[in-house]
Amino acid sequence: MALRTALVVGARGVIGGNLIEHLDRVGGWTIIGLSRRGGVCQGSIRHIAVDLLDKDDTAGKLASLTEVTHVFYAAYQDRASWAELVPPNLAMLTNVVDAIEPVAPKLEHISLMQGYKVYGAHLGPFSTPAREDDPPHMPPEFNVDQQQFLERRQADAAWSWSALRPSVVAGIGLGNPMNLAMVLAVYASISKELGVPFRFPGKPGAYSSLIEMTDSGLLAEATVWAATSPGSRNQAFNITNGDMFRWSSMWPKIAAFFDLEVAPPLPMSLSDVMAGKSDLWDAMVAKHDLAKTPYSDVSSWQFGDFVFAWDYDVIADTSKSRRAGFHTYVDSEAMFLRIFQSLRDQRLIP
């Protein structure tokens, strides 16, 4: 097999970081990671620091990447409203494609990371299980705009595209605004430190609604599968662990890992109640000899509030990817416990 070159855009996030690890592990890839902060180059992996919102900086930094065969796009810029998310996130993707397409004659595929916002999951109860061919909802929605951009751009191009639609992605990654596993781990650790029981903080209906997760390793495998399988070209795929659960059953299992008692749910904003605990976290780091990680890097409270407010089922139909040939499954309970143990082994939590 000829050596492929992957350009991973958003290399420092949970999704991009785990994708780089997967590509490096399976071999056969030269890997280039793009991010605002850059990273440490080692082996077949090199990092480039770039401001993707700056068209000239993007073009200049990518001008020499003539060997790229696959673009894996997982970058994201957060904003205060759904409408404000569209311009920066569409601009970053556009700048990357504008920069790489003219200089990379062997470009085969552009992979786009999406999510259930395509189905309106962030707006309220939506049709479930969601299918890739469900009708669109009223914009604005940057995921949709990004896919439409790729569809238009690909019409006369030799490369193909794919869009991956995971549920909530769980993995290890610091300083990420959408990291539910870290939310759970730090919330549980602080609960234990304060001697309070582990309470579900979301809406009452969210405790009993169905939800599913997507393991970051499984997502990486699926992303590469979609990018390299001829039968998956120019299509979108829902990607999940393959099981679903209710927080009412998962919560006690998470509590048991942290040796915590479970008390009845109590609706509260994590963004509010956890906001003033930076000094407590620093004291925990010293007390338990943890890695010196800033509180801002381990807390994603706004995202926790977002997920725990879903008082309706958030599930999708993944049969399309199964029919197309992707058959990997992950047990969600085992995934959570594995991530928590890894965080503990790395001295990121007590």
Image (spheres, rainbow, N blue to C red):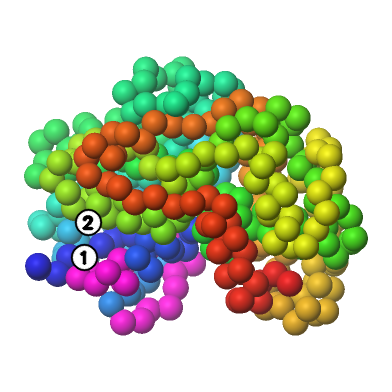
Residue drawn at x 44%, y 46% is 241
| Mark 2 crowdedness (10 Å alpha carbons): few <14, some 14-19, many ≥20 | many
Instruction: Inspect this view and state whether residue 273 appears.
Output: yes
Circle 2 residue: 70
| Res 248 label | none
**Residue visible at 25% across and 52% down?**
225
Quadrant where the C terminus is found in the figure: bottom right
Q: Which amino acid, by three-letter code, is at mark 2?
A: His
- Residue 75 appears in view: no
The residue carrying mark 1 is 5
Q: Position of residue 158 (x, y in %)?
A: 9, 44
Please give the name of the residue rendered at 60% of the width and 76% of the height, measured from the top-left corner: 346
In magenta, the rendered stretch is: 23-43
6 to the left or right of 17 = left
Q: Decide which of tag 1 and tag 2 comes sooner along the chain.
A: 1
**How many badges with numbers are in the image?**
2
Please tell me which residue is depicted at 43% across the width and 63% down the height of the picture: 17
* SS class, disc 2: strand
> Which amino acid is tagged 1?
Thr
Query: Of 282 and 140, which appears nearest the observer?
Result: 282
Say which quarter of the image contains residue 297: bottom right
* Residue 185 location (% of width, % of height): 68, 59
Q: Is residue 40 magenta?
A: yes
Dot 1 and dot 2 residues touching (CB under 8 Å): yes
Kindly state the secondary structure of the residue where label 1 is placed: strand
- In the image: residue 254, left or right of residue 90: right
* Front one among 213 and 246: 246
Give residue 112's position: percent from left, percent from top: 33, 44
Q: Position of residue 203 (x, y in %)?
A: 74, 31
- Residue 264 counted in the magenta span: no
